[in-house]
Amino acid sequence: MARTHQSLGSTKAAAFFSATLLLWVVSVLFEIVFNKRTELLSIVAGGCFYQLANWVIRFCVSRDPLFVNTSVSLLHSAITSTSVIFVLVNQWSVTGFKRMFDHKQLVEGTWPWAYQALCFSCGYFAYDQRDMLKYRLYSGFIPSILVHHLLLLICFTLALYRHITINYLILTLICELHSVFLHVRKVRRMAGVRDAKSRVVKVEWILNWIMFVFARLVSHILITGKLVKDASKFDKGIEWPLAMLGMAGMNFLNAFLGIDLFNAFMKEKKPQRNDAKHDE
């Protein structure tokens, strides 16, 4: 009975998120075709690129849907992290650190290559949402990963349509530096490397925690603080409420991610402790 209820909940979640993804695709195609927004073709390019990567890994490495999905996610995190660092360093060299984070610059301006990077990443989230729905790579009545992707697709696309808060959204993608180590850990475990005593595993966990704190937790809190501080500088409209809603959702998910990460860390350390007791 419990399994039937869980299956029904999963089916309803799949129907809802499939419908929202379809609406998103129709919206983007409408903007490109009828409103001649050719700059949005980078979204399509991003989706196609990551789908192609999916096929290459599936046919050349493994057919396991979870392994393929995680490997493509690792590729996305690496590309996005590199892109964000490039955009930030390039802008820093042009305008200097202080002017970069001026309110007007963050809300109305667009740093070189920031728009394309955001579009390409947006294409990935659409691809990943479809891939997870296709292979049921999620769990729970309200899957947090699907909620996360839907939230990002809404925020990113509205910003891209209106050419506003692009630079703010680029800053939120700094968290992809941490995602690299999340995906490395999953791939490493699927490859059978699970020895907690291994130096590689220890270094990976150290970097994982450092990136979680600074690239994800602290960076998102600072962005939220900047939004609160500059609230009066926003024009009346949906920009500030939507930005605050998006960051509240991100911080909420970060808190749960931190709990999951801690539990995973303790679980991975348990065999090591049990081995030590056995030796005694």
Image: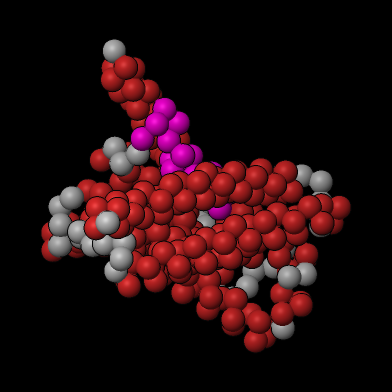
Res. 266 in view: yes
Identify whether 194 is placed above or below 20: below
Q: Specify whether 91 is left or right of 273.
A: right
Range drawn in magenta: 139-157
Identify whether 111 is placed above or below 13: below
Quadrant for the N terminus in the image:
top left
Query: Which residue is nearer to you in this view: 69 or 90?
Result: 69
Instruction: Look at the image and name its color scheme.
Output: secondary structure
Res. 173 in view: no
The percent position of residue 268, horizontal first and vertical second, equals: 34, 53
Q: Quadrant of residue 202?
A: bottom left
Q: Is residue 153 magenta?
A: yes
What's the residue at 20%, 59% (across, down)?
192
What's the residue at 18%, 50% (across, down)?
64
Quadrant for the C terminus in the image:
bottom left
The outermost residue toward the bottom is 93
What's the residue at 70%, 54% (across, down)?
224
Does the magenta stretch mainly form a helix, a strand or a loop? helix
The outermost residue toward the front is 280
What's the residue at 51%, 50% (across, down)?
258
Q: Is residue 239 magenta?
A: no
Q: Specify whether 235 is left or right of 280.
A: right
Query: Which residue is nearer to you in this view: 222 or 117?
Result: 222
The percent position of residue 77, horizontal first and vertical second, equals: 42, 64
Q: Specify whether 51 is left or right of 206.
A: left
